[in-house]
Amino acid sequence: MSLPVDKSPIPEKPLHKNEQLKVESNWLRGNIRRELADSSTGAVSDDSNQLMKFHGVYQQDDRDVRNQRRKEGKEKAFIFMARVRVPGGVCQPAQWLALDQLADSHANGTLKITTRQSFQLHGILKSNLRPLVQQINLAAHFNTRGACGDINRGVMCNPNPEESTLHQQVWPIMKAVSDHLLPRTRAYHELWVADELVDGGEPEDEPIYGRSYLPRKFKIVFAVPPSNDVDIYAHDLGFIAIADESGKKLVGCNVTVGGGLGMSHNQLETFPRLADVMGFCTVDQVIDVAEKVVTVQRDYGDRVDRKFARLKYTIENRGLSWFRGEVERRLGYKLQTPRRFEFTHTGDRYGWTQGDNGNAHFTLFIQSGRVKDTADYKLKSGLREIARVHQGDLRLTPNQNLIIANITPAERPRIEALLRQYKLDTANNATGLKLNSMSCVALPTCGLALAESERYLPELVRLLETEVEAAGLRNDAISLRITGCPNGCGRPSLAEIGLVGRAPGKYNVYLGAAFNGSRFNVLYKASVATAELVPMLGPIIRRYAQERLNGERFGDFVIRAGYVTPTFTPHDFHEQRNAAKGEQI
């Protein structure tokens, strides 16, 4: 006897819990105000923690003391991190001074320049959090609004292009995109800036995001060839500046979509993905294109499983041809064929450079972007004194370094004297490996970190420098990046040597990315203990010195020498599948 066929519809999977939280949050207010006022604990609830990310604030705890406090029956040593939005990395000296002071009075005394051209302040106690964010707005004239959460984050822009005249045309467009995609809710002002809640007023609306905002975070960058310091292929949406034949006038941008670096260990269905070049748009179309790309992801991104909620998976699943068609349908016009461009590097140009306007710029290496004073290197104090006299601006680079920009001929001697006084003029006297190294924060504050990153990088660089110098490669640029987990905040997938934390003291080692950021690296060896890293990498570095071809980069050599073989990623498979269907643009 056969069983009756169940013809009832298959129930849809429920939305992720964060989706309902956003809808019911009263436009991102939730219970944040009440919980910040609760002095009985140093923490806020999980729901408030999620909503506070939209306001640029993360709840963390000091993991160095977590186990001891657990044994003592105490709650975690809760602290907070605030991320300051700095569109394109441009900061005025007065703003630097205000943040420098706030780091001392309300945080742990240091400034962190991030891999996305922003500042982070760490070690903030709950009682200091609202006063700090308020003063970031009122004293520093910055804000933390939209620095995280399921919305577009701060937009990056190449801060040190080959032609400063082109940068002057790109930066305002980038800033306009950043401003256009900010959330419209009044919650940020009420919660963090105003002394009293605002009652009444016009009904609130989010014309771009809606009540549910985006399925996940969204990242946008602007690149000015030949520099790819923003790592444009690693981001959800990118704009590559295209100049006219003179190289001086911006005519438009190539549009890239679908990049992202995050993945999860042992989950092959998650993966990094290089962005696709989708088309070309004119200067006056950039904001429109940015908005429509965001709204397509708003409507079609995965709201069930946050592991697959980024734009890269939307495009991977539906195809670039479909995505471009949907964007163009909303635009009401077609994107043009991409224009020719070339990237040559992803690094910074250290030391002195001359701008088109006669002013000079000094790029200063800051390891891991951590601005602090030590016993023998007064970095924070030196930059404070420079900011007090500097007439130009300061620019954060996507590689966590700092440009003292637009130094007039008249003030240059004073800046040079301060660099010497605080020994900052020696910071760039490092190996090419060190100058091209980068790390995320990781332990002890990041709750996702599986291994050390920022605290381990100096030791790792010091040991590898011995190999580099012995091989005669002191001045050769080799990109090295390390992150404490596979979320990819330090962009390790695009490093010639990439280390991703696997467990305490162990890393997956990846080799073979392109120096210009156009090719991912490949897993060379998994779960390598720290004691084994240098003995493993040293012979490869020495062989590179002996056998490299003229002009051959380290990432290209390890592929030619057979250490790693570029494999088919889901992205590669998708490209081949599209080609077979005739769907290439």
Image (cartoon, helix red, strand yellow):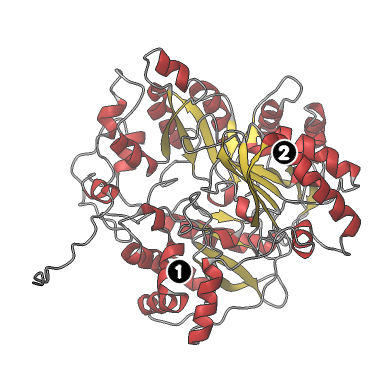
User: Relative to 341, is 506 above or below?
Assistant: above
Give the residue drawn at x 52%, y 27%: 102
Give the residue drawn at x 65%, y 53%: 159
In the image, is 138 to the left or to the right of 505? Answer: left
User: Relative to 192, is 244 above or below?
Assistant: below
Evaluate whether residue 408 shows in this view.
Answer: no
From the viewer's side, name the closer residue of 69 and 269: 269
* Residue that badge 2 annotates: 532
Residue 15, position as x, y percentages in the image: 25, 55
Q: Residues within 10 Å of mark 2 (few under 14, many from 20)?
A: few
Element type where label 2 sits in the image: helix
Q: CA distance from mark 1 to mark 2?
A: 36 Å
From the viewer's side, name the closer residue of 237 and 289: 237
Q: Residue 386 shows which numbered tag?
A: none
Q: Quadrant of the N terminus?
A: bottom left
Give the residue drawn at x 15%, y 68%: 9
Residue 508, position as x, y percentages in the image: 62, 46
Residue 517, position as x, y percentages in the image: 66, 60
Element type where label 1 sits in the image: helix
User: Relative to 341, is 540 above or below?
Assistant: above
* Numbered circles on residues, count: 2
In the image, is 129 to the left or to the right of 489? Answer: left
* Residue that badge 1 annotates: 316
Evaluate whether residue 451 shows in this view.
Answer: yes
Three-letter residue code for mark 1: Glu
User: Relative to 507, is 13 above or below?
Assistant: below
Three-letter residue code for mark 2: Glu
